[in-house]
Amino acid sequence: MYVNPRWRRRLLWTIGAVGAVGVLAVGAAGWYYSGLVIDPVHTPEYPLEVTAVRGDEVTLKGGADTASPGMYGLTWADGNALLGPAVASDAGTVTRKVARVLRGDLRPGVRAYLDRWLWGHAEPSAAGVPYTDVTVPSALGGFPAWRTEGTSPTWVIAVHGRNANPAEALRVLPVFHSLGMPVLGITYRNDVGAPASPDGRLHLGATEWEDVAAAIAYARSHGATGVVLYGWSMGGGIVPMTVRRLPDAPIRGMILDSPVIDWRAPIALGARQMGVPGFLVSVGEWVVERRTGLSFDDLDQVRHARDFKTPALIFVDADDATVPVEPALAFARARPDLVTLVRTTGGGHTGSWNAGPARYERELRSFVSSL
């Protein structure tokens, strides 16, 4: 069949143009999705609505975890309350006990979030532990931090999760205070009030470990002879990066709560939850690597499990809907000689303490006492 050369050229041009538009669209989508991973966010969300307050009970509407077992905080823009267990549930609402309103006015219409830290953006005094505000010097500048008192030469350095702050550690401060172990609650690059990274983006542990290294240097300069690194979520990914990068540092142990052991897992999970097509996940990861210079292979701690010599205590919760537990389980299987694994249910992401404080704290005491 004869095809006019002019039409052939037009057809080829059209196919090329459509292909180029498709590539640009995919690239733009990948760029947008990469930003969800590496752009810092410091504006809290309040997905819950208080629909009723009766005596020592509050009814909440919205969210997927309002009936989670255990103790939580309820935090809103200008207030905070401590909540006990759920006592009733109905279509779309959950009623929980109110242990105490710490500040603000708990009333119908308040927008809030369920707070696994208990006290929101508070200081160690909220947990009944004395502290001092300090500054950790680094090549990027001074990082705000706080330090609790203790007589032990082994310090705990608390590394919070993505877009969080040092208050994430408040739940466990009384344990370490009773053991005489000072706790250094740190900020790292791109936190509120802290120096920004040179590009203003999160590097998922690939560079943030340097800020933990600065905290270790600070602790040693103030009398610490050893440290235990304690990380939640992304902090639980930064900690093993620090251990790998500082093989000669006096790191006695690492405690990881809902850790990001392999970033590909939570990125893929988040994409499925958002309805993002699978192929765009790979594009987004590729864009993240190009925008930041990090390597997802390097951040995959399971791939590097044989490099570790530091004992680890790892908490995972079966109902974690943010960070899949499988990479942490794989890491534990790869290093049973180093890892003490504690599995819980019902707490959700970083909620193992909330679901069972007594067991959690027993595991903490046992682990640090064994170091």
Image: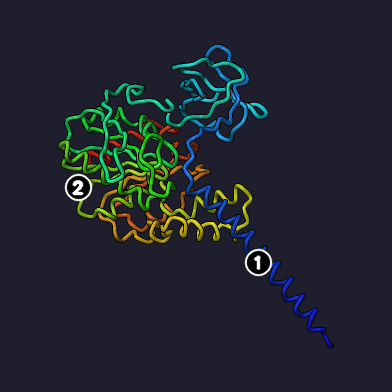
Question: Mark 2 Cα within 10 Å, few/some/many (few <14, many 20+)?
Answer: some
Between discs 1 and 2, the one toward the N terminus: 1
Colour theme:
rainbow
- From the viewer's side, name the closer residue of 183 and 4: 4
Task: Note whether residue 20 is visible.
Answer: yes
Q: Quadrant of residue 211?
A: top left
Q: Amino acid at mark 1?
A: Ala
The residue at the point 29 percent across, 38 percent down is 142
From what the image shows, is residue 101 above or below residue 274? above
The residue at the point 28 percent across, 51 percent down is 243
The kind of secondary structure element at disc 2 is loop
Task: Note whether residue 359 is visible.
Answer: no
Q: Position of residue 197 (x, y in %)?
A: 38, 46
Q: Amino acid at mark 2?
A: Pro
From what the image shows, is residue 360 above or below residue 13? above
- From the viewer's side, name the closer residue of 191 and 328: 191
The residue at the point 52 percent across, 24 percent down is 76
- From the viewer's side, name the closer residue of 27 and 277: 27
Q: Quadrant of residue 171?
A: top left
Measured Cα–Cα span from mark 1 to mark 2: 54 Å
- From the viewer's side, name the closer residue of 40 and 325: 40
The kind of secondary structure element at disc 1 is helix
Circle count: 2
Q: Position of residue 61 (x, y in %)?
A: 62, 27
With 326 as the anchor, is 231 left or right in this view? left
Q: Quadrant of residue 175?
A: top left
Q: Which mark is drawn over residue 20? A: 1
- Tell us which disc is closer to us: 1 or 2: 1
From what the image shows, is residue 320 above or below residue 101? below
Label 2: which residue? Answer: 250
Q: Position of residue 172 (x, y in %)?
A: 34, 31
